[in-house]
Image (tube, grey):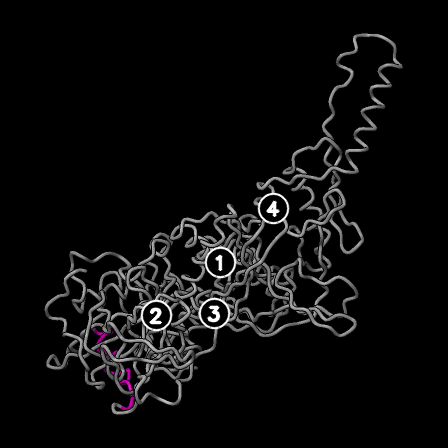
Amino acid sequence: MPAIPSHVPEPSRTDPALIRNFCIIAHIDHGKSTLADRMLQLTGVVEQRQMRAQYLDRMDIERERGITIKSQAVRLPWAPTHDKSSTHILNMIDTPGHVDFTYEVSRSLAACEGTILLVDAAQGIEAQTLANLYLAMENDLTIIPVLNKIDLPAAQPEKFAEELANLVGCDPDDVLKVSAKTGLGVDALLDKVVAEIPAPVGVKDAPARAMIFDSVYDSYRGVVTYVRVIDGQLNKRERIRMMSTGATHELLEIGTNSPEMLAADGLGVGEVGYLITGVKDVRQSKVGDTVTSQHKGAEEALGGYKDPRPMVFSGLYPLDGSDYPELREALDKLQLNDAALVYEPETSAALGFGFRVGFLGLLHLDVIRERLEREFGLDLIATAPNVVYRVIMEDGTEHTVTNPSEFPEGKINEVYEPVVRATILAPTEFIGSIMELCQTRRGTLLGMDYLSEDRVEIRYTLPLAEIVFDFFDQLKSKTRGYASLDYEPTGEQTSSLVKVDILLHGDKVDAFSAITHKDAAYAYGVRLVAKLRELIPRQAFEVPIQAAIGSRVIARETIRAIRKDVLAKCYGGDISRKRKLLEKQKEGKKRMKMVGSVEVPQEAFIAVLSSDDSAGSGKGKK
């Protein structure tokens, strides 16, 4: 562990009046992690020689893609410029900016009293900025509006300061202007955090209550749980109780992140730190749970935040069937780091044993899949993502469908699909192309507001199934990368949906089934049978590939049979002899067609089912 600078105060039960808990929220790429870097340097918790860009982004994927996936908490000592005698403790949480990771932001907000709302002075307010701002307002947090990147030639600080002031309800002069890259104005921002964000309020002598806002799995130390103490205090070596599960553990270590782990004797009111109990079972430490003392503990748990609901489902199957137990264990460990991950075992006739996994969006799916492959060395097939449907039959029975193969046969009364309220922010010149795209995706316009003379906010209701594939990529290409998208679930609606089955030689292949809108079913069927015709090798007999809705075939391709040249040995001779050989071959083909089965190579399944080309895999969604 790197040495901690000598002037960092030893963590102890700090006076709550000197504590400030805050987080940084912003759209992707507006400079949250860079601002966090400057704060780490300015407060001296990271020495210059240990400093690196995006210091708090620990995962390789985060560093490669330049995005934050996991929020990170760090303790910063700061003596305000006007009063150098009193050192305040600032607990800062760096949060992700992508729409898929809103649940990480909501957990961070629950552990804070205030937030820095960061906006890029060259790009202005984006869709995710608005979404995060509304989250902060719901949590009653003090909001400090800040414009970043004012050193860029394209920056327009005056224009965007006015936009931001109108949004937050303050004076444009109150919007701080900083450059996280050069460090300009960051000290003034830390002073403002001390001055404006309220100190945590809690009862010092009450039974201990601490909220778990994050947890990670360490292969050597077990589960490391991050908590914010609300009331009372937690001490080393005491026994604690998790209020939702009732499990009790001994506190082997307790301390703070500065930004490396620093052990302490305990944590008091308002402090943010970590607990280690030596527990290896990942299900013992639930995010959102309340921790209390086993002896004279609290009776009432803290109000947790809402559990994240998965929006997109995809099947994850190991390429090698013997890796199934390793995949289960890997998902168990990732679930601890990622409260939004849900999964259940599933089998497919084509792909064997695997899991149906719920994700918050395509980037979330892509990140989880990449982490499973990198951190656990697994080779996986991910099936094309789909959403959850609710099917009501004519006899009144109800089915929940997360996988197309579960779609019921028989007379269907209604099919409900999830819908979202999408907010798109873009320059006014692209209004036409955005509306055209939303119209083709079965969208309904809710309204439109001009944030300024050249920026517009468009609100649509869209079926979730239409935006989980390539909607984001299409939006970016139609607006030359200027549009930003945010969406939230708003319930469900009835739709004309059908299940398209693929038949090989008359047999249904469950893995190729898809649920699609009635108007798009024909195009889907034609595209898939054409693709399969290229991928499936020729057999010794003719193989029809059909796309069907129920018993009605909507598209067909035929794989021609491989014919052996039975006449090769006939040099001249009577025609009747040749005809006899051809008739014999014809009979053999007929018999083979009756008993033969079509072998579909693994490559064909991977090519058709993988989300890489059908869904764009969510890569590069920034």
Q: Which residue is mark 4?
A: 608
* SS for dot 2: strand
As measured in the structure, the alpha-carbon distance from the residue carrying label 2 to the one carrying label 1 is 27 Å
Mark 2 surroundings: few (<14), some (14-19) or many (≥20) residues within 10 A:
many
Label located before the other in sequence (3 or 4): 3
Q: Are marks 3 and 4 in contact (CB under 8 Å)?
A: no
The C terminus, quarter of image: bottom left
From the top left corner, tell me how far across and down residue 343 is, in percent. 52, 63
Rate crowding at label 3 as few (under 14), some (14 to 19) or many (20 or more) other CA atoms within 10 Å: few
Give residue 453's mark. Answer: 3
CA gap, disc 3 to disc 2? 22 Å
Compare marks 4 and 2 and give the one earlier in the sequence: 2
Dot 3 or dot 1, earlier in sequence:
1
The earlier-in-sequence mark between 2 and 1 is 2
Instruction: Please provide the residue range marked out in magenta.
Output: 188-203
Q: Are marks 2 and 1 in contact (CB under 8 Å)?
A: no
- Please state the horizontal and vertical placement of residue 408, each as a whole percent of the image: 72, 63
Residue at left 39%, top 74%?
A: 107
250 on left or right of 521: left
Query: Mark 4 falls on what kind of element?
Result: helix
Identify the mark nearer the N-term, 4 or 1: 1
Residue at numbered disc 1? 365
Quadrant of the image occupied by residue 221: bottom left
From the image, state whether disc 4 or disc 2 is nearer to you.
Answer: 4
296 in relation to 40, above or below: below
Camera-nearest label, 3 or 4 = 4
Task: Return the residue at label 2.
Answer: 118
Q: Dot 4, how many residues are within 10 Å of its Cα: few (below 14), some (14-19), or many (20+)?
A: some
The three-letter amino acid code for the residue at tag 4 is: Val
* Residue type, label 3: Glu
Cα distance between the residues tagged 3 and 1: 37 Å
Distance between mark 3 and mark 4 Cα atoms = 46 Å
